[in-house]
């Protein structure tokens, strides 16, 4: 029963645990399975014949779709090679939304293009009515001269005061490079990656399930953002590390809104929350109009009308497709 697993790390085989969870009960599933690349996990053997690996993947992918609510989504992280097979499985049982390309350099393997991204498949359970929020990330700036990396030409005053809407190519979230920030785990994901996915696809109080929890990244992101989690992990050592880290998580907020931070700066915020936290500025044309009207007619309603419409808070409802 899902309620028995809420906000816990369950030690066990994900297929066994998933089989005890009700249909249509979880808001979002995120899976980062072993990549079958001979990674040195403590107990799991990461090397199976491809056919056997894919048959196993088909089983847990089917289970993830089954336990997801009709309004929910399924995210799967892997190398592009395996994602091409996952997509053909998921296309029959869910609805393709995006292939998110996460820019994350790996090692040269010789006589190929250098692999420089992982993919995150994003599927919804239903074709319409699934939960989705647009995300904003800060405008990119040069570290040395602090000028914007993108040329906004003469339209700088129309830029969003916080940052741009996030696309399906994520270059601003990095792999964990420093060993001091890493657990004893061969492929731990960065928390901001999971926080972006959670902000994008859930509301506070929703349930995020991860069948391959590792050392707890998705559960940490869910808890920091006021969501519930269910984590499944086969390895008792990773379970212990995850539980210890989850117990120390604090809410990740700014002025009462859930946001994701990296190195002390907001890295992801929902567009609807950004509208309240960082209200739009007047453009230079509007400022000029305002000055002209102030000089000419102090009773003019045009400028005030503009102000009113700019500050009107947006309704907090998910975008429905
Ligand atoms: C790629 S890692 C996940 C890392 C995780 N995203 C993190 O950031 O820590 C895959 C994890 O799946 C676990 N695993 C392998 N087979 C499993 C199974 N049948 N059921 C549950 N967990 C399993 C491994 O022990 C490993 O920790």
Image (cartoon, grey):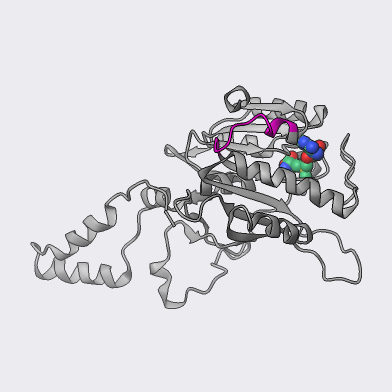
Q: Position of residue 32 (x, y in %)?
A: 72, 46
Q: Nearer the viewer, residue 82 or 285?
A: 82
The C terminus - image quarter: bottom left
> Relative to 115, is 1 above or below?
above
Can residue 222 be found in the magenta stretch? no
Q: Position of residue 243 (x, y in %)?
A: 70, 26
Q: Position of residue 210 (x, y in %)?
A: 67, 38
As drawn, the residue found furthest toward the bottom would be: 153
Can residue 22 be found in the magenta stretch? yes
Residue 284: tell me if it is visible: yes
Quarter-wise, where is residue 167 in the image?
bottom right
Q: Position of residue 198 (x, y in %)?
A: 56, 44
Taking the image in four quarters, ligand 1 sits in the one at top right
Q: Which residues are magenta?
A: 16-26
The N terminus - image quarter: top right
> Relative to 29, is 301 above or below?
below
The dominant secondary structure in magenta is loop
**Number of residue marks:** 0
As drawn, the residue found furthest toward the front would be: 92
The residue positioned 65% from the left and 39% from the top of the image is 218
Q: Nearer the viewer, residue 128 or 291?
A: 128
**Drawn side of residue 305 relative to residue 45, left or right:** left
The residue positioned 91% from the left and 68% from the top of the image is 110
The residue positioned 90% from the left and 41% from the top of the image is 45
Residue 35: tell me if it is visible: no
């Amino acid at each position: 029963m899902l309620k028995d697993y809420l906000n816990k790390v369950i030690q066990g085989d994900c297929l066994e645990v998933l089989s005890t969870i009700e249909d249509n009960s979880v808001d979002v599933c995120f899976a980062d399975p072993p990549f079958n690349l001979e990674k040195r996990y403590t107990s799991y053997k990461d090397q199976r014949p491809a056919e056997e690996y894919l048959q196993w993947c088909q089983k847990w992918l089917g289970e993830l779709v089954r336990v997801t609510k009709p309004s929910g989504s399924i995210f799967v992280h892997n190398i592009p090679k395996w994602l091409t097979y996952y997509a053909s499985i998921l296309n029959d049982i869910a609805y393709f939304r995006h292939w998110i390309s996460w820019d994350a350099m790996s090692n040269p393997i010789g006589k190929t293009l250098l692999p420089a991204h992982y993919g995150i498949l994003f599927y919804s359970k239903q074709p319409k009515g699934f939960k989705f929020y647009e995300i904003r990330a800060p405008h990119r700036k040069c570290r040395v001269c602090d000028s914007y990396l993108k040329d906004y030409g003469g339209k700088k005053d129309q830029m969003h005061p916080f940052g741009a809407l996030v696309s399906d190519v994520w270059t601003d979230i990095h792999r964990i490079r420093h060993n001091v920030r890493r657990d004893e785990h061969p492929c731990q994901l960065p928390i901001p990656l999971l926080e972006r996915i959670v902000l994008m696809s859930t509301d506070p109080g929703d349930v995020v399930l991860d069948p391959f929890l590792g050392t707890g990244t998705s559960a940490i992101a869910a808890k920091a953002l006021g969501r519930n989690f269910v984590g499944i992990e086969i390895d008792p050592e990773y379970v212990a590390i995850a539980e210890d880290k989850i117990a120390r998580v604090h809410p990740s907020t700014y002025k009462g809104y859930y946001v994701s931070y990296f190195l002390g700066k907001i890295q992801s915020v929902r567009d609807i929350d950004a509208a309240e936290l960082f209200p739009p500025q007047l453009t230079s044309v509007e400022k000029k109009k305002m000055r002209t009207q102030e000089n000419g007619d102090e009773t003019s309603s045009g400028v005030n009308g503009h102000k009113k419409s700019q500050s009107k808070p947006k309704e907090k409802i998910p975008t429905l497709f």
